[in-house]
Image (cartoon, rainbow, N blue to C red):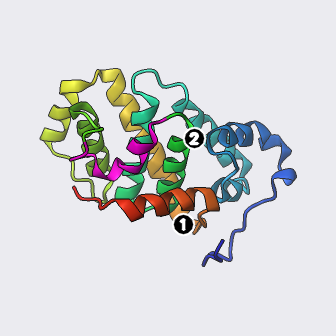
Amino acid sequence: MKQGNNHLVTPVERAATPHLEPIYQAIENNLGFIPNGILTMAKNPMLAQAFGQLFGCLSRFEHISNELKWAIATISSNAAGCQYCQGHFSHIASRVNVNRAKVLAAFEFETNVLFDEAERAALRFAFACSTSPAHLEKSHYEALGKHYSEEAVIEIAAVIAICGFLNRWNTAMDSQLEADPAAILDEINQITKFTV
């Protein structure tokens, strides 16, 4: 892992924060490891605990599929310019029984036959919402409304918002991408060109 620019805040050692172990375990269940961004956040245990509860909501969503949830997270992070989160969310998707071909084709959602119109509407919405400034138009809402219930739209927006927090956190902390998410991100970058 390369050395980042942030010399002001360094990640804690997991063993030094045993009171955060339930949060670590939940995140480790998704990723297979504890990311540097969380270990930096752990310097403020109240923040880490609050984020752990928020992130935990993602696993309890009932109105959008896991496949769509992690695709939204990946596309949202890409739109925000956060390669760290983009790598992590692609890595999570590859670990939770999401079609690997679909994970690798996420950035070609507009043209790839693996994505249906409902998924395209959600991913267009995620991308437009996650740019700064956001580029949401009435057509994004209309397309979303054709395919999703109010409850599903709330879950889609929640994924985007949670990603927004992580995108800004990891950018501000200059979190360095770990080996496993870096590998899948490299694989995606080698086979796709992302255009909206």
Which residue is located at x 59 percent, y 64 percent? 177
Quadrant of the drawing holding the C terminus: bottom left
Q: CA distance from mark 1 to mark 2?
A: 27 Å
What amino acid is at disc 1? Ala
Residue at numbered disc 1: 172
Which residue is located at x 50 percent, y 48 percent? 89
Which residue is located at x 42 percent, y 54 percent? 77
Nearer-N-terminus badge (1/2)? 2
Residue 114 point in image, percent of width and height = 30, 38
Magenta stretch: includes residue 111: yes
Toward the viewer: 107 or 153? Answer: 107
Which residue is located at x 73 percent, y 57 percent? 43
Relative to 31, 167 lies left or right = left
Residue at numbered disc 2: 95
Within-10-Å neighbours for mark 1: few <14, some 14–19, many 20+: few
Looking at the rendering, the stretch of residues picked out in magenta corresponds to 98-112
The answer to whether residue 160 is visible is no
Magenta stretch: includes residue 165: no
What amino acid is at disc 2? Arg
Residue 148 point in image, percent of width and height = 27, 24
Toward the viewer: 65 or 180? Answer: 180
51 w.r.t. 116: above or below: below
Toward the viewer: 105 or 7? Answer: 105
116 w.r.t. 151: above or below: below
Image quadrant where residue 143 sits: top left
